[in-house]
Image (cartoon, coloured by chain):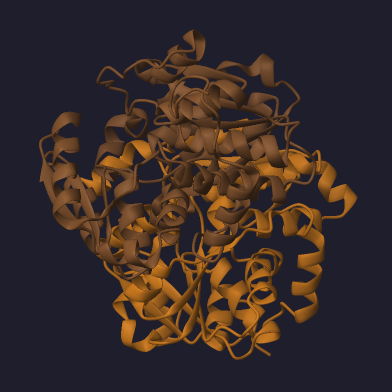
Chain colours: A orange, B brown
Amino acid sequence: MKKENQIGAEITVRKADLLNARARVRDFVRHTPVLSSSYLNSLAGAEIWFKCENFQKGGAFKIRGASNAIFSLDPSELKKGVVTHSSGNHAQAVAIAAKEKGTEAHIVMPDNSAEVKIQAVKGYGGKITYSKADLCSREDTLDLVKNRTGTTFIHPYDDDRIIAGQSTCAQEIFEEINNALDYLLAPVGGGGLLSGTALSALHFSPQTKVIGCEPELASDAHEAFRTKAWVPANEPITIADGLRTALGRRNLNIILEHVKDILLVSEQEIKNSIKLIWERMKLVVEPSAAVPLAALIRNKEMFQGKRVGVILSGGNIDLKKMGDLFS
Amino acid sequence: MKKENQIGAEITVRKADLLNARARVRDFVRHTPVLSSSYLNSLAGAEIWFKCENFQKGGAFKIRGASNAIFSLDPSELKKGVVTHSSGNHAQAVAIAAKEKGTEAHIVMPDNSAEVKIQAVKGYGGKITYSKADLCSREDTLDLVKNRTGTTFIHPYDDDRIIAGQSTCAQEIFEEINNALDYLLAPVGGGGLLSGTALSALHFSPQTKVIGCEPELASDAHEAFRTKAWVPANEPITIADGLRTALGRRNLNIILEHVKDILLVSEQEIKNSIKLIWERMKLVVEPSAAVPLAALIRNKEMFQGKRVGVILSGGNIDLKKMGDLFS
């Protein structure tokens, strides 16, 4: 049997894990609404349901995985606290879930993190340790904190509990939409959301094809999917800041097995799609969340007349930068 | 008996008119969701329900009144079409409702209207006649179109059918919120929404105090409320562009009778409140829609521990201008 994390290794997240995750986080995460827009339906020629994770606690789906992981720790682990590294939505999510359990969240953040994100983590009671911006320094700093404090590392995506937690988003969608969706589209960065979504479809809506959506400028998941081999992310500069991270190996294994395709979109297509969601749906979404709609519009013929779910993954954006986007 | 439209004149919108309006527009307007934010609840020290009319057809509550007015026309009137003057949300609403009935909507728009609004009206099939920007020229042009075409004038607010239509927003709120609200806050410009909301509370939730919220820079409703006399609006320059219009006389009569108070807010308070709604609720709202939350926060002690409804009146905003707002 192949070693955990190698290509083709056994998938260790089971249906029971998904159901347990749902039960574990149900009363804590927000059951977010599913909205639609007749304008966007007619623009795309499809019936689209948007799952509004921008309304989620902490402003993004990340709390689903973070709370499932943290709520499954045993009391002695919980007492020691948790640690992660992230400059984005996962940092806030870990801080929120740890606070709920009355334990400490140590967050390693690059020293060039946006002030607004630092303040958000502090606002939720997270204890910040700064590192340099490169991944190597972040991981070293994390190890230092971990060894000093004996805390449990909550990986942002390459973790079964995180994957099971993120699966609860699609579980809610499948419960809410009566007739089966033909497609369900999710953005892919590290692959936590996409792999969880794919497992959710496998067990709860096998007719639904799950598709990952990724910026051309951060196409490591697309390439790994084509070549069936993990590839590094080369410091991508896409505006979809949540998707700059490299795909996780465990996530890739699930994606290779249960995701139908990975579609790419350009930066301009992402911007157009943000504008459509802001202007037409009146929803504040972050650039990463607009990637699936961009992929849907770019591949219109593929989705013609189909029932399509789209996960709006989050809404955390620095509004000061919006002017640039729309000018 | 006082003449219609004089201070103290009889209010001619009855409970039956509100119920008929609800039945008439029910299948056409969107039943918009009510959302809440634990962050804003704790910031304000109150339990707040936000009625999301930014999700409404056409992006604002205006379709409620416009469709009630247009759907109540008799077949011969309907055949001739309708006319109104507006550079904003009412223009789009009239165009949408007229299109639904297969009749023509003539919209008199000032020749300095924003291109985006002109395009929106055209997109819904409205026939635009341009006038100069001043009210006098708008009214003259409207009379010309009306006389030439024999169309029915759909006033933006000083009209019983419009008031009954706007009342359906609060009717939905009262149906949805189980325990009675202590307060319900609405912005006030021409007064169509505020007067309809007040009548809705009178008949369907008499425990609820209705309060109007207005920019200091466009305080004609506040002054009229204090002095019990209609006052003109002096070309107000508030960023809340939907509230620059003068209060209607018919609306003032209802407001004097059934509105508890009118609260004022500064431009900075409106900007802060827009930012809170965008950042914390992830909702795109226009400046006018942020005025009630600004009033709630400015008058915190008044609403302490209370159950408060807030009508987010619309979400039509030129995103290019958002940069200025947040920089």
Please name whichever residue, B83 or B57, is drawn nearer the observer in this view of the structure.
B83
- Residue A196 position, x and y percent, is 62, 72
Visible in this render: residue A241? no
Q: Does residue B117 show up?
A: yes
Residue A3 in which image quadrant: bottom right
Residue A312: percent from left, percent from top: 49, 62
Residue B167 lies in quadrant: top right
Residue, x 19% and y 36% (percent of image)? B139
**Placement of B252 over or under A54, stated as above or below:** above
Left or right: residue A327 versus residue A63 is left
The residue shown at (25%, 55%) is B151
Residue projecting furthest to the front = B1
Q: Residue at x 59, y 48 (%)?
A: B18
Q: What is the number of callouts on the image?
A: 0
Q: Note whether B97 is above or below A129 in the view shown.
A: below
Please say if A100 is above or below A7.
above
In screen coordinates, is B143 left or right of A41?
left
- State the residue lying farthest toward the top: B227
Of residues A222 and B175, which is closer to you in this image? B175
Judge by depth and name the residue closer to the eye, B48 or A209: B48
Picture coordinates of residue B72, whole percent (x, y):
45, 58
Residue A148, quarter of the rendered image: top right
Q: Where residue B149 sits in the image (x, y, percent)?
A: 17, 57
**Is A170 displayed left or right of A281 in the figure?**
right
Figure quadrant of the C terminus of chain A: top left
Front-most of residues A217 and B19? B19
The image quadrant where one finds the N terminus of chain A is bottom right
